[in-house]
Image: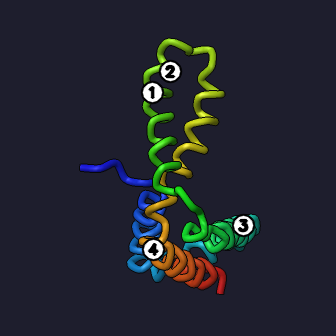
């Protein structure tokens, strides 16, 4: 089985979060409101989470992979880089931070060809999660 792309993983995590909220908002809402009366920062936490979701949505919307010539080859290139990093990591333990930085960028580029397949789903999930999160404050 092929390794999941960063965007497939993001979609899965968002789906899991949405499914949890779908089932638990009626139970969580009174608890959040009671906690917020004691610790007002809980409302700020929700607002910051909604803000992060909106930032993620903006960044996903900015990615137009159809306009990138040679994207498949670039993705294969970064896949090869990830293989190299996996092999080099044990030999260069003092370079872990640099290796992790390179791996993070490579993960994004490697996943770009799969973005179009999941982009609309990711946006819809973010919107649904934001509705749930905002309802916790109402």
Give me the C-alpha separation between circle 1 and circle 2.
Answer: 5 Å
Question: Based on the displayed image, in which of its 4 quarters is residue 32 positioned?
Answer: bottom right
Question: Secondary structure beneath disc 2?
Answer: helix
The residue depicted at 37 percent of the width and 53 percent of the height is 4
What's the mark number on residue 67?
none
Residues at marks 1 and 2 touching, judged by CB atoms closer than 8 Å: yes
Categorize mark 1 by other alpha carbons within 10 Å: few (<14), some (14-19), many (20+). Answer: few
Q: Which residue is mark 4?
A: 18
Q: Which residue is mark 3?
A: 48
Give me the C-alpha separation between circle 3 and circle 4.
Answer: 17 Å
Q: Which residue is mark 1?
A: 86
Question: Secondary structure beneath disc 4?
Answer: helix
Q: Is residue 109 above or below residue 130?
A: above
Image quarter of the C terminus: bottom right
Q: Earlier in the sequence, mark 4 or mark 2?
A: 4
The residue depicted at 57 percent of the width and 61 percent of the height is 69
Q: Which residue is mark 2?
A: 89
């Amino acid at each position: 089985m092929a390794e999941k792309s960063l965007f497939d993983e993001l979609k899965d995590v968002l789906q899991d979060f949405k499914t949890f909220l779908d089932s638990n908002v009626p139970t969580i809402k009174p608890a959040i409101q009671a906690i917020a009366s004691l610790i007002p920062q809980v409302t700020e936490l929700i607002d910051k989470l909604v803000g992060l979701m909106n930032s993620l949505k903006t960044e996903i919307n900015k990615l137009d992979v159809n306009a990138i010539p040679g994207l498949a080859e670039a993705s294969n290139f970064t896949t090869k880089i990830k293989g190299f990093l996996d092999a080099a990591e044990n030999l260069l333990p003092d370079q872990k931070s640099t290796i992790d930085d390179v791996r993070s960028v490579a993960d994004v580029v490697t996943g770009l060809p799969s973005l179009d397949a999941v982009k609309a789903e990711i946006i819809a999930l973010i919107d649904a999660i934001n509705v749930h999160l905002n309802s916790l404050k109402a």
